[in-house]
Image: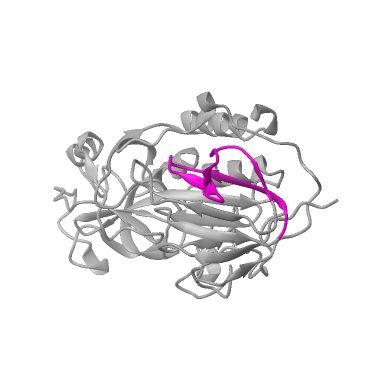
Amino acid sequence: MTQTAALEVLEPGLQTTVQDYPGRRGRQSLGFFPSGPVDSLAFRLANLLVGNRPGAAALEIPLGRFQAGVLAPGRIAVTGPETTVTLNGSPVPQWESVPVETGDVLACEVLRGPGHRLYLALSGGIAVPEVFGSRSTFLLAGIGGLDGRALERADILDTFPAAPSRPRRLPVSLRPSYPTAWEIEILRGPHADPDFLTAEDFADFLAASWRCDLSSDRVGIRFNPHRFRWARPSGGVAGGHPSNLLDSSYPPGGILAYGDVLTVLGPDSNTSGGFAVIATVASASLWKVGQLRPGRDTVTFREIHLDQAAALSAQVNQLLDVKALA
């Protein structure tokens, strides 16, 4: 007997989208950043809990406030920051698979504590067409997901057939924590000191506490303005500001100096441009960027080196080992 969990959207929330992981890899030369979940850790864990492959299409729900009716029996899992999740009005746990039946009503309340995005996985994975090799929604281009847009009331989400899976739960000791003051690991450059920033600038960058601006979204996480000294008076032929350079490729998670404003490039960002990327968030730490609450959370950046970044990735891979699930 297959286990699916198709849904009808009753309350879509702020900007709920279908995403998959790792998104549209290898399309940057065509102008596509990968899209996919901003917090890929909670996303992949949600899929593992319901017996899917880690990258299967699932829902990203900013700030909660989502409700759906169940159209087919199966399993669901909600991961991410703590909130109240109910099934037919009765609370159900996060970070574990929950059986659902046709006619059930699933609801997630608004996030009132730390964190920013919930993830909802359905057994089988959401069945939407692939576009350029991914089911992820890219809102700016209007492609992927469900008709290239955020979910709306009365949308129907079908799922692929899935083999029966046992109940799974991620132990409390292994669950990510969601503070309001974050430390995020970064690697220096490609456009840091001494060619672009001064050594004092980079020291200031690491010492400062950066507030997440209200204008932050899937395109980029923006921070409060800061006036660097810069190691050069201007961008020369590239422009008048020292952060200007001739167009170059941007890395996912790059920390862009858009004049005096720093921005962490999100999964729906530009693939290239003419501004310095002073540092890059370690890939194993990118999930933290997805949980920064605009207008409230603060960040300090900690520089690490390639071997430390590899060790962080190994830790994340251990967490994503299905044997870690109870």
Res 97 → quadrant: top right
Compared across the picture, whether 208 is left or right of 303 comes to left
Q: Nearer the viewer, residue 69 or 121?
A: 69
Q: Magenta segment: does it hold 97?
A: yes
- Extreme residue in the front direction: 89
Residue 67 pos. (x, y %): 51, 59
Res 222 → quadrant: bottom left
Q: Magenta segment: does it hold 209?
A: no
Q: Nearer the viewer, residue 277 or 169?
A: 169
Q: Which residues are magenta?
A: 72-100
Q: Which residue is at a point 60% across and 61% down the rendered structure image?
A: 69
Q: Which residue is at a point 43% across and 43% down the rendered structure image?
A: 83
Compared across the picture, whether 274 is left or right of 243 comes to right
Quadrant occupied by the C terminus: top right
The answer to whether residue 179 of the structure is visible from this angle is yes
Residue 176 pos. (x, y %): 47, 33
Residue 207 pos. (x, y %): 21, 34
Count of numbered badges drawn on the protein: 0
Q: Which residue is at a point 25% across and 47% down the rendered structure image?
A: 296
- Extreme residue in the right direction: 1
Compared across the picture, whether 232 is left or right of 215 comes to left
Q: Nearer the viewer, residue 245 or 277?
A: 277
Residue 320 pos. (x, y %): 62, 35
